Amino acid sequence: MDNYGFLSILPPVIAIVLALRTKQVYIALLFGIWFSWVIINDWNFFTGTLAAIEGMVNVFKSPGNTRTIMFSALVGALLLFIQYSKGVEGFINELNKVIAYFERKQSGYSRVVVQLMAMFTGILLFVETSISSLTVGTLYRPVFDKLKIPREKLAYIADSSSAPSSILIPFNAWGAFIMGLLLTQGIENPFGTMLSSIVFNFYPILAIVIVFVVIITKKDIGPMSKAEMRTRETGKLLNDNAKPMLSSEVTSFESKEGIKARAYNMIVPLATMVVMMPFYLSYTGWDAVEDATSFGDHVFKAIGQGSGSSSVLYAVLTAILVAMVLYRSQKIMKTKEMIDLVLKGISELMPLALLMLLAFAIGDACNALGTGQFVANWSKDWLSPAFLPAVIFVISSFIAFSTGTSWGTFAIMMAISMPMAEIHGAPLPLIVAATLGGGVFGDHCSPISDTSIISSMASASDHIDHINTQLPYALIGGLVTVLLYVILGLIMI
């Protein structure tokens, strides 16, 4: 069977429902993967089961997937390094001075300031979503804990300031990927089209605005309000039945005794990781540039052509090496201690690497089923031109929600939305924005999203609790976006 029709959307939807209902994300994803391959193998349970196993093995055939999984595991080593060297303690000491200053100005104001600092840090690290979420969670988790701000709030801020900023400031691998898709569709000026679409990309803009408003007004809704009340009344940073994405071995790892707490022991390795990201993007894309007019133009275009998965892996490895040299020069650690910490850090983040593996595997299974293509083709016949932007946003959202990947959604939907925009005479920037915004929105709402998984991990939050607390804010942004696209569709098409 080549066309699976409605069956193609069942496995991802069932996996998502199971994950939300049972909070057993691993089991839900495994079931979704298994069910997908059983359908593909004509309901033969034996061959379907073997195919599901091979499907998970084949995840590693993609160099990008392998690099991302390696990055996820190596992050554990970096986190243990900065914890053991008292870098985290030193940074907290510096932040405490800022907190004390604002507390003298107005009681309780420090909570607002620290949350705003976390949000703006996430926005400034637009170069890569994984590094943005990771840095925000790592830097601010100890301070959030001290101020009794729930882990779910940190995960929400990390998640909602990473992908939105990366797509609104597209001088990164996201921009390169989007330009490549536009070129494939025959768009003569992909960079100009992408930039023109930013003003219409309402969901990422609203996601950041909503985070800002929530922080400033101190008004929370739904599950996040309950999380804030729980932490305020009991001091519990997580629910009683929560399973943090990051083990306590990493978050509460004992620092080395007899050494001075210095903030730069944390800041230098993390800053190295952030700074090296655009360097490696430029390096990996350098040879692909053929028409550069100057060195600066060559660098800019090389960043656009660079490999995001290679760059994040190289960046975290460089950060670990810099940390080793830094700590060895201070005689904080011996070589054997550092090797042991690397291995321990990797082992502690194996659950995250496994989750990433399963998320990629279900995405591959959905591609084999044609989930995205079915949803897109199903919508073609009944689309009214005026409602084209709103419907494209909704379809992109559903595909991203079902598959857990915004980039995969962009790849599927650009091939469909661009020709449809041409047929209906719709403005290209508007349709591009609806496609991209829908991918980010669906990704924010999905429990199998890799960016949401990393946000939960970096914040040491329960992943399903993160999704549940973030969902009401994401839905508000999504509903407002749909209304705006309906209005613009009626006016412009």
Image (tube, rainbow, N blue to C red):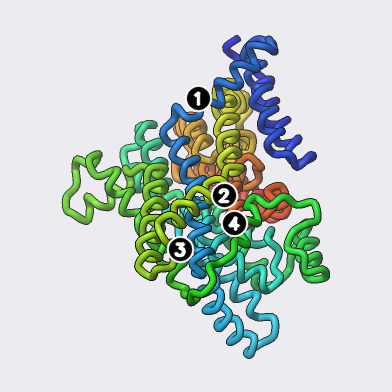
Q: Do the residues labelled 1 and 2 touch (CB within 8 Å)?
A: no
Between label 3 and label 1, give the one nearer the viewer. 1
Between label 3 and label 2, give the one nearer the viewer. 2
Between label 1 and label 4, give the one nearer the viewer. 4
Q: What residue type is labelled 2?
A: Ile
Give the class, few, some or many, for how many residues have Cα within 10 Å of label 3's Cα (few <14, many ≥20): some
| Percent x, y of residue 244 | 68, 52
Location of mark 4 (residue): 250
Q: Is mark 3 on a helix, strand or loop?
A: helix
Give the class, few, some or many, for how many residues have Cα within 10 Å of label 4's Cα (few <14, many ≥20): many
Q: Which amino acid does label 1 sit on?
A: Asn
Quadrant of the image occupied by residue 186 = top left
| Percent x, y of residue 467 | 69, 49
Lower position in the chain sequence, tag 3 or tag 2: 3
Question: What mark, if any, has residue 454 been given in the picture?
Answer: 2
Lower position in the chain sequence, tag 3 or tag 1: 1
Mark 1 to mark 2 CA distance (whole Å): 22 Å
| Percent x, y of residue 454 | 57, 49
Q: Is mark 2 on a helix, strand or loop?
A: helix
Residue shown at the point (53%, 56%) measured from the top left: 133
Residue shown at the point (45%, 60%) measured from the top left: 125
Location of mark 3 (residue): 124
Mark 3 to mark 4 CA distance (whole Å): 26 Å
Q: Nearer the viewer, residue 70 or 256?
A: 256
- Seen in the picture, residue 24 relative to 119 is either above or below; the reply is above
Location of mark 1 (residue): 58
Q: What residue type is labelled 3?
A: Leu
Q: What element carries label 4?
A: helix
| Percent x, y of residue 31 | 70, 27
Lower position in the chain sequence, tag 2 or tag 4: 4
Give the class, few, some or many, for how many residues have Cα within 10 Å of label 1's Cα (few <14, many ≥20): some
Could one spot residue 271 in this view of the protein?
A: yes
